Image (cartoon, grey):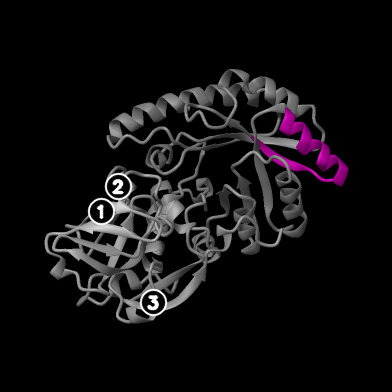
Amino acid sequence: MSPYSQSFITTDNMLEWYHIHNIEQLDSPALLVYPERVYHNIHEITDIIEDIGRLRPHVKTHKMGEVSQMMIQFGIRKFKCATIAEAEMLGLVNAEDVLLAYQPVGPKIARLLDLQDIYPDTRFSCLVDNPTIATKINNLCEKRKTRMDIYIDLNVGMNRTGISPEQARELAVFISEQPCIQLKGIHTYDGHIHDSDLNVRTKECDQVYSIVQKVMDEIQALYSHPFSLIIGGTPTFSINAKRKNCECSPGTFVLWDWGYKHTIKELPCEYAALVLTRVISIIDEHHICVDLGYKAVAAESPLPRVYFLNAPSTYPIAHNEEHLVLKVKDSADYPIGMALYGVPVHICPTVALYSKANIITNNQYRSDWEITARNRSINY
């Protein structure tokens, strides 16, 4: 049994779950991670999909080896990542199957092949959406006397990467003619589908799936080995999880955030990561300043970018590199040094702002976990 499986229940009932007894040991701003809640979220997601073999979580959210190991302990064997560093982090924890859900260009091709040599117990693959990169990967594999598994990246409306459904068959034919790359299936990300209404989301997701399934049938006819379909992220997870012939790749679920908590309401996930900040200045009767600049919480969204669990009535009015100004009813309620516990609107880029996470169990700061894949490279 995981050491975190019971902690979700045994948190000090005299305190809110997020409060820390020994908070004086932590400087601010800081990233707080609550492993018992991470455990809970992984458990809930594996329950929803039932067949863990169809689960391929994206590690871009947490970027931590310890969280990846928790997933492996649950029986998860397949993973998705966005960077070479994330791929290497998964190699370091002996993940079995790692898809770089990013088309490698430039030095990334050689770096990915390096990982394949250095971590032989991990099976690496990547995305391709055009013949130019397919050729480059094939040629470098041929030079190194190795092979690489690839997936065609299909654009179904995100309009960021991927080949159009109409051109996918032609690319599949081209790949079949290359001796050192092997097509394993189709990958598509439907991140443009995120309506808070589950019925709307389901309709849009089903429309995308019908397009993808048609492409899958066309390409499968060209090959004798069975293909895999890797589809979706967190917003469409509960919908795609009901299908039997695809792998699902949620990522944010493991830590959760304010944005998804209030839009993807059907998923039973809990906040598992917070940002700690402190009051550093009293501006006037109705305004205070805390040390949570946009170097400490993701700033790509409009204000508010963070909500405070122990100060829900505060409202941010100005955000700078090292400062966040909050409007309050009475600044006398917020003495200098007071700790505030914040839920980011978007946790994924927030995690990437920190080199370590402070680990909190049973209302105590216990240790630190390195955010290993925050860097662009680890060893290779």
Foreground pick, 288 / 1: 288
Q: Amino acid at mark 3?
A: Leu
Please say if 175 is above or below 362.
above
Foreground pick, 22 / 12: 22
| Closer to viewer: mark 3 or mark 2 | 2
Start-end of magenta stretch: 132-151
Percent coordinates x, y for residue 289 in the rendering: 27, 63
Please say if 149 is above or below 278.
above
Real-space Cα separation, disc 3 to disc 2, in angstroms: 26 Å
Determine crowd level at label 2: few under 14, some 14-19, many 20+ residues with C-alpha closer than 10 A: few
Real-space Cα separation, disc 1 to disc 3, in angstroms: 23 Å
Percent coordinates x, y for residue 133 in the rendering: 72, 33
Q: Element at badge 3? A: loop
Determine if residue 129 is in view: yes
Q: Element at badge 1? A: strand
Q: Earlier in the sequence, mark 3 or mark 2?
A: 3
Q: Earlier in the sequence, mark 1 or mark 2?
A: 2
Say if the magenta span includes residue 311.
no
Q: Amino acid at mark 1?
A: Pro
Please tell me whether the stretch drawn in magenta is mainly helix, strand or loop. Answer: helix
Please say if 127 is above or below 333.
above
- In the rendered image, which residue does mark 3 sit on? 26
Q: Quadrant of the C terminus?
A: bottom right
- In the rendered image, which residue does mark 1 sit on? 316
- Taking 211 as reference, is 128 left or right? right
> Which residue shows up at 67% across the image and 44% down it?
125
What is the number of the mark on residue 303? 2
Percent coordinates x, y for residue 157 in the rendering: 47, 26
Marks 1 and 2 close (CB-CB < 8 Å): yes
Q: Amino acid at mark 2?
A: Leu
Q: Earlier in the sequence, mark 1 or mark 3?
A: 3
